[in-house]
Structures are given as structure tokens and as C-alpha cells.
Image: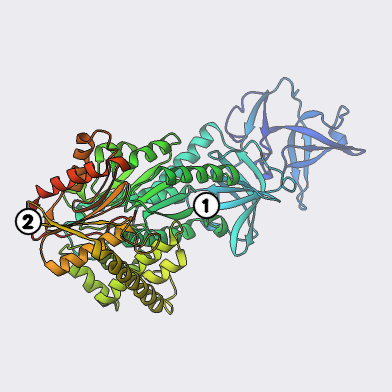
């Protein structure tokens, strides 16, 4: 309240200024509680707040005062030089009714900070990092996130009572550090009660508005994809909100061509949005991690590693726990154990995928889920196609760099969707012919194999020609694609003589290969790609429906052309039918992988072949994805 806001009729009312109050909040006709801070021959100096001090002349005093004594005063005069003079009021401070005068702040938005200005910011503390010098509070307001540095002494935590999630008011001076704005803290105060509620309401309204995804026109007209746009908008909204709130993002994606066509565009869009909303570029580098996963589901190994890093970052850097963004994996029952592990820590999860889903199992654990199967579509809509549109919703400035990527994704996962013609035409308009796109796809798979658990940021950017070095891109892609074809040819030369061929009851060719013993190990191509290459060779030779099984001691990878398989259903049936088989797995309808216990391999594979023999022949159906590596 202000001095004029209340009880002028009460002779005992005295106003106490908050520490941040200035002389602008002092009225001449009001009485104020003051503290003596100095005694001189001609009077006493008093403080009304940190910024309001002045002299009570000895001619107006009827009693003696010592430093620390309290008295009630009124404002007499503001001199030309800014000095203040006060007179004592005939009120005993012990008997007065004290009402607080709150400082009237003019709050500055983080986007309006100007170097050397004295400002007041209000917002939520989203990170607290203790350096060897100052304590850095990352403050999120309506416009973005700005670092506020407070110094107690070297390496000592300033304002130890302030925690992540607190709503605070920061007063200080704006400085530039390596071209980025920051606030040198003069004072930092946690807001409580109504003041905190008002700020939270203001922040929430602004965040909701800023988090809204951009309205975009799809790159091509494709009615089959339209039902997924609402879900993609939900994911984009969640991502943008996560960035605004200063929460980190851990992005997991399948380590294959489609997975990288999905993740790299989204990574680029998120990075640009982070740059727009975060002043501290050094800190923002830790807000997004892109991490490949070898399996087409979220393995416990990866989940445990992600959780350990998240908890470590919270302890070391004061970060919130992250959003987990799953791309080209994350839709199946195999993901559930890992998801349940994160659920204990309330880590939000969003998934964009095109593997055959188990919605009843995963959706209770997901904050958002986009999958073509949920809308009556299938794997021909690849995750890369979906994620290019998602990236554009996050930041549409990435559009020009991504027009060729959906075609690469389609080739990488061998999509036979009618829309592929439109995507290929879009890529041709950008200077890519189909051979260029195929080389990019082959190079991505080759690079992914050798990168293993590394994101390979620069290499992948160059190969995919997204935010990379355009001068190096053609040579890099051609070289890796050539190496991939050479290694595949060498693998086929060794493996093809060992392929066992048979005919199923439905007339389809059955090819089986023990990739553990009859193919080169620990090199490219891995068992999954080896099986795919053998399968493609047989399809090319015969032109007939073909099923290929590449198996090892405890796994099998499956490919099919021209046979209407339903691999997820077959796996579910094997789980029920083979006691002690330890069967798990999944994938698409006609491409996938299964695991089992080593001692039950014969029983599992025999039962699998029997089910394949009962499958319906469909000459128009062909495989559309590279099988997951084992």
C-alpha cells in the first residue's frame, strides 16, 4: 500500500517503507517510521529505507537519540541537491499502528533490457548455478530467460534461501557479457502470497501465448497426414513451453536414416528457439541433447543413463529434470519398463513414431503421442516426414533447409506411399535427384553404424545437408555412400552362399541366414542391415513374394515383400504360445525384430515360420523400412 491508501483518520497510523522504496513513495503529509543511523551536533540522521535517508535538525528535537533508536518523522523538505530534511512527529513508535508501504516497481521484460540500465525483473528461477565466482540465477519471465549474477564471495552461494521454482523480484544493473545481456543483482527477493500469485498468473498467460506453435502450410498436400497435425501441434507446444520454462530436453531417436531425418530437423528448430528466448548462449548449449538409440525402443540401459545424467545436471547445474522427446521409437510395450522408471521422477515424455504402437500400454505414461496407426494409417508415413512438419511448427525459419529431408526419410525407410512422388519433386526443386537422395540415405546408415552412441552432430549435418557445410556435403555423402555399398557387397559375397531357401505353404519364398556364423561380425552392415540386403537381392532376383529371416543365438530380424504379415501380432502370439521362450519384439507390420532365450531358438523360429506360411499373399505390399540393427 501507499501512504495515502488507508487510515488518515487514525492518529496512530505510521507508515513503514519497504527497503526498496524511494523518495518518490514518500508523501509530505504522512508519518513514517525511521531509524537513527548517525548523531551529530546539529541533529540526527535517519533511514526510512535503503534509499531514503535525511536529517532531523536539532532545533526540532525535544529528546536525545542514539544510533539504532526508532522515531516517527514527517518529510519537511527536499532540497535542490536532493538532500531530505525531516521533523519528528508526536507519535510514540511503540504505540503506533504500523502499515507497510510497498515499493512501486516498474518491471522490465527481459527482451527490453538495455546495457547500463537499472532494472527490476519479476519471474521464476529456473536454474541456479554456482560458479567459482558469482551465483548465476537463470530467471524466466514473460519474454525469455536471462542470467542474473549475484556475488557473495568467490565460490560462495548468494541468496541461499532462494530455490529453483521460486518466484522472485530482481533489481540490478544490465551488463553485456560476450555479447549477451545479464543482470548484476543488487537485490533479490522471493515473492510470497498475492504478489507471487500475480506474477505466476502473468507468466502463465504469457507462456501459453508464446508456446503456441506456428501455423504452417504442409510441405505437400497429403490427406493421410492431416489427422496427425493436431498431435504434432501438441508436441510443438510442449517443446516450446519446455524451452521457455528453462527445462532441458533429452531427445532420443532411432539410429537409422529415418531416425536422423526426424531428429536433426527438430534439433535445429529447438536450437533456434532457444537462441530466441535465452540470453545465456553458453548455458543454452546444455538445454538440448540429441542421443541415438540402437534399438527401435527405449532400452533400460538408455533410460538409466538418461536419468543419471538428468539427476547429475540437477545437482551440478541446478537444472530442472528434462523433457524426454522420443523420435522414431517409443510407441511399444517394450518401452514401458523404461518409461515407468522415469515416471517415478515425474519426467514428461513425448513420442513421435511410426512403429506399430501399443497405445494401451504406453499412453498412460506419455504426455503426447503421435503415430500414424492411431489414425488408421501405417508406417508409410515415416517419422522423418512427420518431424519436418513438427520442426516447422517450432520455428518456421528452418523450412528452406528441410525441403529435401522428407524424401530422404522416405527412401531410408523405403516408403511406398503415393506422396513420395510429391516429396521427390520437392527435393528436385531444391537440386536433389533421386540418386542424390539415395546416397544421402546410404551415408546416414553408414555413419550411424560407426557413430554408435554418439550423435555425430557435424558429420550428420554435413551428410544430410542441414545446417552443415555445403561445400563439404557432396563429397562427404558420396564417400560414405560408396563405402556403405562396398561393405554391403563384401558382406553379401560372404553370406549369400549360406542362405537357406524354401517355399512356404502360401507360395512365398522363405530365406533364412545365420548372421551370427555366416556373416562378418562387428562391422557394417550389422545383422539387421545384412538381412535387409540379402532380402533385397532375393526380391530383385525372383520378383516374387519373399520373407527373409536373419537370426542369431537369441534374436531374429524379419523382412517381407508381397506377404501380408503382422509381425507385432505374431510376436504377441508367440509370447502366449511358447512357454519359457522369453519372446519379445515388434516393429512394423512387415519388418521387425524379435528376441528370445538362446535355448528356445528352434522352437521360436519354427513357430514363426509356421505363422508366416499362413499369411496372406499381397503382391502390392512391400517392405518399407530398414530393419533395426541388432
- Judge whether residue 410 can be spotted in this image: no
Between the C-alphas of marks 2 and 1, the distance is 63 Å
Mark identifier at residue 507: 2
> Mark 1 Cα within 10 Å, few/some/many (few <14, many 20+)?
many
Mark identifier at residue 504: none
Horizontal side of residue 604 vs 14, given as left or right? left
- Of labels 2 and 1, the one closer to you: 2
Residue at 74 percent across and 24 percent down: it is 93
Residue 228 coordinates in the image, percent (x, y): 23, 52
> Mark 2 Cα within 10 Å, few/some/many (few <14, many 20+)?
some
Horizontal side of residue 449 vs 116, given as left or right? left
Q: Nearer the viewer, residue 328 or 145?
A: 328
Residue at 78 percent across and 33 percent down: it is 35
Of mark 2 and mark 1, the one earlier in the sequence is 1
Q: Quadrant of residue 213?
A: bottom left
- Residue wearing tag 1: 145
Q: Quadrant of residue 303?
A: top left
Amino acid at each position: 500500500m501507499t501512504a495515502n491508501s488507508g487510515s488518515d483518520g487514525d492518529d496512530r497510523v505510521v507508515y513503514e517503507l519497504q527497503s526498496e522504496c524511494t523518495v518518490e513513495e514518500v508523501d509530505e503529509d504522512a508519518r513514517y517510521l525511521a531509524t537513527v543511523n548517525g548523531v551529530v551536533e546539529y541533529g540526527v540522521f535517519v533511514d526510512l529505507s535503503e534509499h531514503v535517508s535525511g536529517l532531523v535538525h536539532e532545533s526540532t528535537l525535544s529528546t536525545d537519540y542514539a544510533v539504532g533508536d526508532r522515531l516517527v518523522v514527517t518529510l519537511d523538505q527536499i532540497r535542490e541537491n536532493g538532500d531530505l530534511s525531516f521533523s519528528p512527529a508526536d507519535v510514540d513508535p511503540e504505540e503506533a499502528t504500523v502499515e507497510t508501504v510497498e515499493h512501486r516497481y516498474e518491471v522490465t521484460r527481459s527482451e527490453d533490457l538495455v546495457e547500463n540500465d537499472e532494472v527490476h525483473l519479476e519471474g521464476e528461477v529456473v536454474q541456479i548455478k554456482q560458479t567459482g565466482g558469482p551465483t548465476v540465477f537463470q530467471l524466466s519471465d514473460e519474454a525469455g530467460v536471462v542470467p542474473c549474477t549475484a556475488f557473495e564471495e568467490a565460490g560462495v552461494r548468494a541468496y541461499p534461501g532462494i530455490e529453483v521454482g521460486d518466484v522472485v523480484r530482481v533489481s540490478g544493473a544490465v551488463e553485456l557479457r560476450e555479447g549477451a545481456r545479464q543482470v548484476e543483482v543488487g537485490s533479490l527477493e522471493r515473492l510470497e502470497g498475492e504478489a507471487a500469485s500475480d506474477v505466476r498468473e502473468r507468466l502463465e498467460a504469457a507462456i501459453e501465448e508464446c508456446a503456441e506453435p506456428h501455423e504452417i502450410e504442409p510441405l505437400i498436400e497429403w490427406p493421410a497426414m492431416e489427422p496427425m497435425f493436431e498431435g504434432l501441434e501438441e508436441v510443438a507446444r510442449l517443446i516450446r513451453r519446455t524451452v521457455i520454462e528453462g527445462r532441458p530436453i533429452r531427445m532420443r531417436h532411432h539410429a537409422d536414416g529415418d531416425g536422423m531425418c526426424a531428429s536433426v530437423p527438430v534439433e535445429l528448430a529447438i536450437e533456434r528457439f532457444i537462441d530466441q528466448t535465452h540470453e545465456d548462449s553458453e548455458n543454452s548449449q546444455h538445454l538440448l541433447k540429441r542421443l541415438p538409440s540402437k534399438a527401435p525402443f527405449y532400452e533400460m540401459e538408455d533410460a538409466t543413463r538418461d536419468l543419471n545424467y538428468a539427476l547429475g545436471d540437477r545437482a551440478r547445474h541446478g537444472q530442472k529434470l528434462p523433457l524426454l522427446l522420443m523420435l522414431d521409437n517409443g510407441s511399444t510395450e517394450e518401452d514401458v519398463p523404461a518409461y515407468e522408471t522415469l515416471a517415478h521422477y515425474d519426467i514428461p515424455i513425448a513420442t513421435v513414431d511410426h512403429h506399430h504402437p501399443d497405445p494401451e500400454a504406453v499412453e498412460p505414461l506419455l504426455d503426447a503421442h503421435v503415430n500414424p496407426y492411431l489414425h488408421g494409417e501405417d508406417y508409410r508415413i515415416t517419422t522423418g516426414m512427420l518431424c519436418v512438419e513438427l520442426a516447422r511448427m517450432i520455428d518456421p525459419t528452418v523450412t528452406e533447409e528441410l525441403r529435401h529431408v522428407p524424401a530422404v526419410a522416405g527412401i531410408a525407410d523405403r516408403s511406398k506411399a503415393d506422396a513420395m512422388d510429391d516429396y521427390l519433386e520437392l527435393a528436385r526443386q531444391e537440386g536433389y535427384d533421386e540418386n542424390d537422395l539415395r546416397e544421402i540415405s546410404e551415408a546416414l546408415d553408414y555413419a550411424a553404424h560407426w557413430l554408435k552412441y554418439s550423435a555425430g552432430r557435424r558429420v550428420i549435418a554435413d551428410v544430410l545437408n542441414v545446417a552443415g557445410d555445403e561445400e563439404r556435403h557432396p563429397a562427404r555423402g558420396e564417400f560414405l555412400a560408396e563405402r556403405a555399398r562396398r561393405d554391403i557387397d563384401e558382406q553379401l559375397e560372404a553370406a549369400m552362399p549360406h542362405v537357406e531357401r524354401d517355399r512356404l505353404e502360401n507360395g512365398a519364398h522363405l530365406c533364412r541366414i545365420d548372421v551370427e556364423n555366416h556373416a562378418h561380425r562387428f562391422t557394417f552392415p550389422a545383422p539387421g542391415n545384412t538381412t535387409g540386403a540379402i532380402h533385397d537381392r532375393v526380391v530383385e532376383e525372383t520378383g516374387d513374394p519373399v520373407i527373409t529371416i536373419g537370426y542369431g543365438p537369441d534374436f531374429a530380424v524379419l523382412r517381407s515383400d508381397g506377404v501380408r504379415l503382422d509381425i507385432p501380432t505374431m510376436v504377441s502370439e508367440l509370447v502366449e504360445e511358447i512357454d519359457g521362450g522369453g519372446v519379445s519384439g515388434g516393429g512394423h507390420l512387415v519388418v521387425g525384430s524379435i528376441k528370445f532365450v538362446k535355448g528356445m531358438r528352434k522352437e521360436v523360429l519354427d513357430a514363426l515360420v509356421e505363422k508366416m506360411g499362413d499369411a496372406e499373399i499381397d503382391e502390392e505390399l512391400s517392405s518399407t523400412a530398414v530393419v533395426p540393427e541388432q
